[in-house]
Amino acid sequence: MATSVNSTCRVLYLHVQNVSRCSSRPFCCSYRRTQQSSVSTERKADHGGTNTVETIIVPRRKKRDSLSILRALSSTVGKDFTAAHNRYLDDPFLIPVSIREKQTYTLSRASGKRAAKYMIENHSPLFQYSNEEPKVQAYQPPQTEYAHPEPSEDALMERIGMRRVIDAIEVYKNLRQSGEKLPLETQLRLLELLAVYNCTDPAPPPLPEETVYSQDAASQRIKLRKTWHTNSIVEELFEDLPEKTPAAYNIMTRGMAKYLDVDGAFGMHKEMLDKGIPVERETYHTLIPLVPYYTEKEKWETVMTLLKEMKERNFQANLATFNSILLSLSRMAAYPQSQKHAMKTLVEMQNCGIEPCLGSWYYIIQVFYYFEDRQSNILHDIVSEVEGKQFTVQDSSDMKFFSNAMMKCFRNLKDLDLAYRIDALLHTGNNIRFLNDAFSEQSYSWYFMQLLCMFETMDKIMEYYERIVPSMWTPAASGMGELLKAIELHDGFEHIPRIWSDVVMFDYMRSDSFTEPLFALMTKKTHPEELQSQFADIAEYMIGRWKQERVDEYTNPIQMTATNVSYIIILCLRSDRFESAWSMFQTYKQHDRMFSGILSDESLVALTNTCIEQKQPEKAIECLSVVGNLGLQNHKELAEKILTEMDLSESQKQHIDVLM
C-alpha cells in the first residue's frame, strides 16, 4: 500500500514540475514554487525498510486577465498566407484582389458606415431602443438637444464638454455682448478648446477603412502647411483674459505650433521668456520640431537653446523629448552635421536610460539616408539593435518604420540579407500591425520583391510571392514586369502559367505595357510540349476574352495590338493549333484598323510555312499577300518557296506572279 501511494505521489509531483516548467507558455496552467518548499518529505518505517512519502502543496491560482485564453489560442495558429485580410471577409464572393477593387470595397464599406451614422445623428429619436448590457455611451445616438439652450456659463461648459466648437463660440459671443463676466477657469477651458481645434468643429474621426487609404504623399504635403487662423476668436479671447496665466500662454503656443504658425509660436515663446512666464515641457516638445522652419538663427543652435532652457527648469527628458529632437534633425537632414547630432542624441538617450521606439529609428534612417546616393551601415546597426523584439506603439511615426526601412534597404543599399532580417522583424510577435495602411503594405512589399527579383533564385522568389500575393500585396503592372525579368534571368518559364492566373485576376490584360513583354517572353524560345501547350491555352484565352468583350460591348474592352497578335499566332503554331492561329490572322485582316502596329515578320513567315506544310496553297497565298502589303523583307523568298514546294494551279501561279 505504501509503495502504491509513493508511486502516485511521485507521478503527481513530476506532473506539477512539468507544469511549472511550462509556466511561460500562454495556455499552460502556471504553477510556481513558493519560497518554502512545495514538497515535504516524510520517512516511515515499513517492515524494517525506509520509504519516502512526498506531500504536494499546490500553490495558489495565478490571476489572469480576460484575454489570456484568447492570447493562448491565438498563439497556437499561424498566419494563413492564402487568406484575404479580415476587412474583406464579409462575403467570400466579393473578396477583392486588384488594387482598385480593394480600394473600392474598403471605401464603399466606410461610406455605408457613414450613411448609417448620418441617419443616427439626424434621426436619433428613431433609434432609442437599445437592449445591450452594459451600455456603451459611444455607441448611443448622439445628443442633439442641449440641456442649457440659453446663453449662460453652464451652456458654455456644456458645449465645451461636448466639443461643439462653433456652438461654444456663439454662446461666448452672446455672453460677451451681454456684458456677462466669465470666471477665468471657464475662459481657459474655452481657450484650450479653440486652440486645440483651431476655432472649427473637429472633423469626425476616420473610420478604420478610411485610414487604410489615407496615407499618401498628397495628404502628407497638406499637413506641412500653415493652417492656423490668424486674428481669429481664439486670439481675441486670449487678449481679453483678465489675467494671462502661464497656462494660457502655453495653450496658445502649442496651438500655433500644432497648426504650423511658426513665427507666432516662437514669438509667443519669446514673450514668455521676456516676462518670466514658465514654459511647460510639452510646449518645448512642440517647438523643437518647428526649428527647421524658423529662419532667424542657426537651426541646431536654436534646438540647443531650447534644450538648455529645459535643463534650467529641471525638466526630465523623456522619449517624447528625444523624438522631437530627432524629428527636427530629420527635417534638416541636408544639414552637413545632422548625422553627428543624431548620434549624440542617441548616446544621450542611452545615458538617460531611455530605449528608442520604432519612430526614433525611423527619424535616424531619415537623417542618414536623406539622399539616395548616401551609403551608411546605420541601418544594419539599427536592425541588430531591434532584432527579435516585439514593439508597442509609442509614437505616431512608429507606423512608418518598416516601409521606410525596406525602401532604404533597396534604394540605398541593395542588400538582400538585410531585407530578410527586416522581414523577420516584421513577423516577430505582433509587429505586423505596424503596416497599418495600404500605402505602407504596397511600399514594403514592392521594394522587398524587387530585391528578391534582383538577387534570389526563382524558387525563392515564387515562395515569397505566394506568401504575400494577394493577401498582403497586389502588385502593380510594373511589379509584375519585374517578376517577368526575373523569370527570363533565371530561366523560370514554368512559372508563367501561375503568373498568368494572377494577371487575369488582377485584370492586367488591358495593359499593353505588360501583356506585350509577357507574350514576348513566352515566344522567346521553344519549350517542352506540356509547357508549350499551356502557353497556347493562354493565347487562346486572350483571344476569346478579347472577342467576347466586343460582343458584350464593354465600355473599356481589352485593346489588342498587332504585336500581341503576332505573339499569339506563334504560340498557337508551336502547339500545332493551326486553326486558332489562322482564325486570329483572319480577324486581323478583317479588322486591321482595330489593331495598332503591324504583324511581325516572324509570325507571318511561321504561318506561311505551316500553310505550306499542310498543303493549303490558298491560305499560303493569302499570307503572302499580307506580307507584300506590309512591305516585309521576306516577301520574295516566301513566294519562291510557295512556287517550288507546292502544287499550284495556273491561276494560283499567276496570282503569285502579280504579288511578286
Image (cartoon, rainbow, N blue to C red):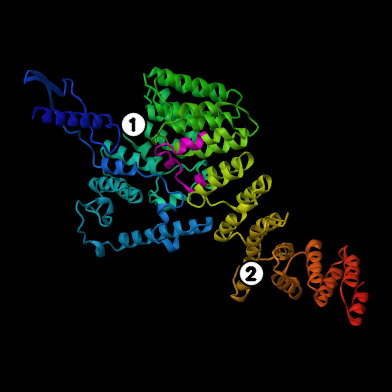
The percent position of residue 436, horizontal first and vertical second, equals: 44, 45
Q: Residue at x 31, y 59 (%)?
A: 121
Q: Residues within 10 Å of mark 1 (few under 14, many from 20)?
A: some
Answer left or right for 306 relative to 372: left
**Most foreground residue, 89 or 600:** 600
Identify the main secondary structure in magenta.
helix
Please, what secondary structure does the residue beneath circle 2 have? helix
Residue of label 1: 247
Q: Is residue 611 visible?
A: yes
Residue 222 location (% of width, % of height): 52, 45
- Residue beneath label 2, please? 546
Q: Secondary structure at mark 1?
A: helix
Q: Quadrant of residue 554?
A: bottom right
Q: Is residue 49 above or below residue 162?
A: above
Residue 7, by quadrant, is top left
Residue 397's place in the image compared with 161, above or below, is above
Which residue sits at x=54%, y=33%? 293
Position of the N terminus, as image quadrant, is: top left
Where residue 268 sits: x, y (%)?
A: 44, 30
Q: Toward the viewer: 155 or 607?
A: 607
Which residues, given as a range, are shown in magenta?
421-441
Which amino acid does the dot numbered 1 rest on? Ala
Q: Depth check: 516 or 329 in front? A: 516
Q: Is residue 422 a member of the stretch shown in magenta?
A: yes
Q: Which amino acid, mark 2?
A: Trp
Image quadrant containing the C terminus: bottom right
Say which quarter of the image contains residue 93. Answer: bottom left
Dot 1 or dot 2: first in sequence order is: 1
